[in-house]
Structures are given as C-alpha cells and as structure tokens.
Image (cartoon, grey):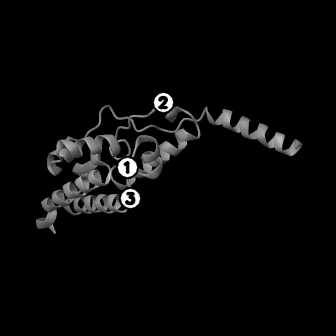
Amino acid sequence: MKILKRVLIVLLIALVLLQFYRPEKNESEYREVASFETETQPSSEVKALLEGKCYDCHSNKTDYPWYAEVAPISLLIADHVEEGNEHFNVSEWDSYDAKKRDHKLDELIEEVEEGEMPEKGYALIHGGITEEEKATLISWAQNARKNYALDK
C-alpha cells in the first residue's frame, strides 16, 4: 500500500508540473481558407462540415476548447493538430502544385470513406459525421479533383 501511495504522489506531482509546460499553439491571425474554397467550390453544406470538423486540425488557425489548456490533453491536441497539418493544410493550398492538390483531395476521400476522419477522439467530443454528410463530402471532393485531371 505504501508503494501505491508513493506512486500516486509522484504521478500527482508530475501532473502538476506538466501544467507549466505549454505546447506551441496553431494560432495565425486568421484562418486562411479562401484560396482553397475558391478553387474547390464547396457548397454551403460542405463549407459548414469543413469548418466544423476539419479546419481546426487542417489549417493554420485552430479554435481551441477550454480543456486544451489542461495537460496532458493540451499535449494530445497539439500533437493531433501538428500531424493534421503535416498531412493536409488548407491554408497552404497555394503552395501545393496541381498533382499534390489532387493527391490531397484523394487522401481526404480515402480517409473519410474509411471512417478515419474526423479522428475518433475528435468525433467523440465534437461529434462525428453522418453517412449522408460523409457522402456529401466525398462527392464534393471527387468533383473538385476534376480540376486537376487535365494536369496529370
């Protein structure tokens, strides 16, 4: 019992100390998605899906919930946002060539079809997407990929 008590005290101290470490946040002045939206032409329904389920992890500006200030959750969120931006960042759309844009939209389709996006942890807290929303998002992305068919 003494060992368990000591372990719990050490863990509590570690948790308190961890509160002083702040990971870098993804906070640009504003969320730059105009170029991406102008080129891919999402409907208002798709825009709402992108804003509500995608842009926090896939743009240069994340709207952080209150619990993102509490470690270790802050560390998990920072990692998810960083990884999300590594794979697909709509704020960097202009820096992608046509082949990469097509590939990113193809990845979006694949991830949504397989139920990998939005991530399970995000969906658990913020809600996932319905089968109808999934179909709408996939249809939009497939249509947007047509912009790049001639460039292949």
The residue at which mark 3 appears reads as 115
Please state the horizontal and vertical placement of residue 68, each as a whole percent of the image: 50, 35
Quarter of the image with the C terminus is bottom left
Tell me if I can see residue 59 in this picture. Answer: no
Q: Quadrant of residue 7?
A: top right
Q: Are marks 2 and 3 in contact (CB under 8 Å)?
A: no
The residue at which mark 1 appears reads as 85
Instruction: Please tell me which of labels 1 and 2 falls first in the chain.
Output: 2
Q: Residue at x 28, y 47 (%)?
A: 90
Q: Quadrant of residue 107?
A: bottom left
Instruction: Tell me which amino acid carries mark 2.
Output: Trp
127 sits left or right of 73 in the view: left
Please state the horizontal and vertical placement of residue 69, each as a whole percent of the image: 52, 32
The residue at which mark 2 appears reads as 66
Checking the image for residue 28, the label placed there is none
Q: CA distance from mark 2 to mark 3?
A: 27 Å
Q: Residue at x 23, y 43 (%)?
A: 47
